[in-house]
Amino acid sequence: MKQAYLTTIVLLERMHRQFLEVLKAELDRLEIRDINNVQALILYNIGQDELTVGELTLRGYYLGSNVSYNVKKLTEHGFLKHERSPHDRRSVRVSLTEKALELRQQIDAMFERQLSEVTSEIEETELNGAVGSLRKLERFWLQQLGFGPRVADFPFAA
């Protein structure tokens, strides 16, 4: 069990880096040079929403990135528009520009292409099982950080 646990940790980190490389290759293929892979992932995760930088940080996991810096760069390059909240002047809400929405559609097309290819290798039930296991691991790690109830705190825990 220990080896499987440690291997999972290594694979998660490696897979995240590999995915970012796949996204970088797609940006290169599209000849998009004014945005990097992490910034493209941030845009994709914003989608149609209007978020604060804090909400964006909570929503996504941007390994080794400074979300505030990336939001600034995305705004400078015309991918994000931002407005101060009328209710709290300290809060800035960001949303995608038309330029960013077009890029998001291209990234979504990449996901669709990948999905059509991956289904020949992995069945949906396998992916769903992996998602379930990863969510359990995520909850466990959050519990280790003091977020959420510990398993032993549940009355039905054995």
Image (cartoon, rainbow, N blue to C red):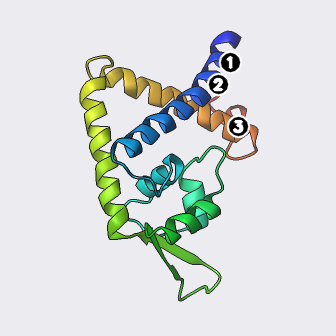
Is 121 on the left-hand or right-hand side of 20?
Answer: left
Nearest the camera: 101 or 35? 35
Residue located 55% across and 60% down the image: 56
Frontmost of labels 2 and 3 is 2
CA–CA distance in space, label 2 to label 3 = 20 Å
Residue appearing at x 50%, y 38% in the figure: 20
Residue 92 image offset from top left, x and y in percent: 57, 77
Quarter of the view holding residue 114: top left
Q: Position of residue 71 (x, y in %)?
A: 56, 65
Image quarter hosting the N terminus:
top right
Q: Which label lies toward us, 1 or 3?
A: 1
Identify residue for label 3. Answer: 150
Q: Residue 53 location, x and y as percent? A: 58, 66
Q: Position of residue 113 (x, y in %)?
A: 26, 35
Check residue 103 in the rendering and tell me which mark sits there, or answer none: none
The mark nearer the N terminus, 1 or 3, is 1
> In this figure, which residue is indicated by the disc labeled 1?
6
| Left or right position of 31 against 157 | left
Q: For residue 9, which numbered disc appears in the image?
A: 2
Q: Residue at x 33, y 22 (%)?
A: 125
- Mark 1 residue type: Leu
Element assignment for label 1 = helix
